[in-house]
Image (tube, rainbow, N blue to C red):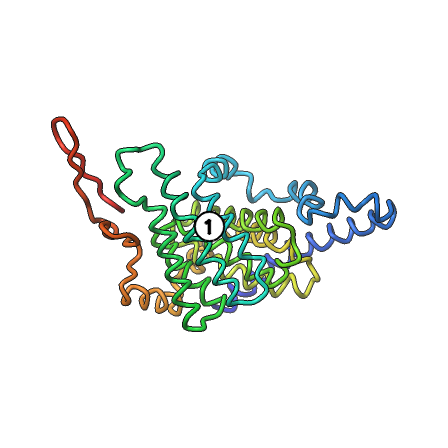
């Protein structure tokens, strides 16, 4: 990343982290004044205590309310968010990867069933949403076997999501881990779900403004935010919100977003290795090819239905 991009990103992240740290300090002062018992309920969540005040400053998200409600209503995305939130409770890197792979495998029947509910005629074909999740699981499983780092996994899955945006919830979970590290073990299930959901909205904001390839900016934003929030002492539970605010500002700078959306050579190499091993994105289940492939279903009555994937 060029130095001017790094400086701008770190400046954006620093501003957001400073706001989060100030709110956290204000909440701590209030707790001292009210007494620990009175403030315990407000502080228990980690996100909720600061959301109301900070939300007023997050004007970068004002334009995406409709988009948020549209995407957040997709239950298959919710299922993957749950998987990634559960994985954040892992203490070790290997355990983290293992929870993702096993969680996605358990969720695949649910994802496919929900995604096909509105179109029963497609019930004989594994849904693309399930295919994307399966491909992400295989990719992470391969990286785990090779001893890859969490940062490498984030880059590789971001490259996958640039080709298939249905993998965005997996990118969101990996990005949440990138900024919170092992702190997720200390958070409640609700906090972990909120962290992944917030990261998913950040990814959606980038993609909405810059197209599918813009998800590649998220790992770079996350790295910048991690550096600045650690130096500012921002609590881990608030860091995903710093990423979301920073990503919203990046999405408003088309030139910067285009530069940050450039492919990651390392991430592409990792993804190519999966493809070379027979795990082509979009070919997650037997009988369904990649983008552009088709399958013909014969039904009773005149005519036939041709479904093109991709």
Which x, y percent locates residue 297? 18, 38
Front residue of this view, candidates 259 and 58: 58
Query: What residue occupies the far bottom of the structure in this picture?
Result: 147
- Which quadrant of the view contains residue 58? top right
Q: Viewed as shown, does residue 108 lie left or right of 32?
A: left
- Crowding at dot 1, Cα within 10 Å, few <14 / some 14-19 / many 20+, comes out as many
- Indicate whether 119 appears above or below 39: above
Q: In which quarter of the view is residue 111 placed?
A: top left
Residue at image position (63%, 59%) is 185
Residue visible at 38% across and 49% down?
Answer: 165
- Left/right of residue 220 with respect to residue 189 in the rendered view: left
x then y, percent, for residue 100: 47, 57
- Judged from this view, the residue extending furthest toward the top is 301
Residue linked to disc 1: 169
Between 152 and 299, the one nearer to me in the picture: 299
Q: Residue at the location (88% across, 47% down)?
A: 33
Secondary structure under tag 1 reads: helix
Q: Which residue is more in the foreground, 164 or 224?
A: 164
Asked if residue 243 is positioned above or below residue 70 in the image, the reply reads: below
- Find residue 160 and report its image quarter: bottom left
The furthest residue to the left: 302
Q: Residue 283 at x, y = what percent? A: 27, 54
Across and down, in percent, residue 286 comes to: 25, 52
Left or right: 28 in relation to 79: right
Residue at the image position 36 percent from the left and 34 percent from the top: 117
């Amino acid at each position: 990343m060029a130095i001017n991009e790094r400086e701008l990103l770190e400046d954006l992240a620093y501003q957001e982290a400073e706001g989060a740290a100030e709110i956290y300090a204000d909440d701590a002062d209030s707790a001292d004044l009210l007494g620990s018992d009175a403030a315990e309920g407000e502080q228990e969540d980690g996100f909720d205590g600061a959301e109301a005040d900070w939300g007023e400053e997050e004007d970068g998200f004002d334009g995406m309310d409709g988009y948020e409600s549209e995407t957040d209503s997709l239950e298959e995305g919710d299922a993957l968010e749950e998987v990634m939130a559960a994985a954040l409770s892992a203490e070790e890197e290997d355990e983290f990867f293992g929870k993702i792979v096993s969680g996605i495998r358990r969720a695949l029947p649910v994802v496919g069933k929900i995604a096909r509910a509105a179109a029963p005629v497609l019930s004989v074909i594994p849904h693309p949403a399930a295919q994307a999740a399966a491909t992400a699981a295989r990719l992470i499983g391969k990286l785990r076997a090779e001893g890859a780092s969490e940062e490498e996994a984030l880059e590789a899955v971001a490259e996958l999501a640039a080709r298939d945006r249905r993998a965005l919830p997996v990118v969101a979970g990996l990005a949440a881990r990138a900024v919170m590290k092992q702190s997720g073990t200390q958070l409640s299930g609700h906090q972990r779900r909120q962290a992944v959901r917030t990261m998913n909205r950040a990814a959606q904001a980038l993609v909405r403004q810059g197209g599918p390839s813009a998800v590649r900016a998220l790992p770079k934003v996350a790295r910048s935010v991690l550096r600045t929030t650690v130096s500012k002492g921002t609590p881990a539970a608030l860091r995903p919100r710093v990423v979301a605010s920073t990503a919203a500002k990046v999405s408003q700078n088309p030139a910067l977003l285009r530069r940050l959306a450039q492919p990651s050579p390392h991430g592409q190499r990792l993804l190519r290795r999966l493809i070379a091993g027979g795990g082509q994105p979009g070919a997650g289940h037997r009988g369904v090819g990649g983008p552009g492939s088709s399958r013909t279903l014969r039904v009773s009555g005149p005519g036939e239905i041709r479904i093109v994937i991709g």
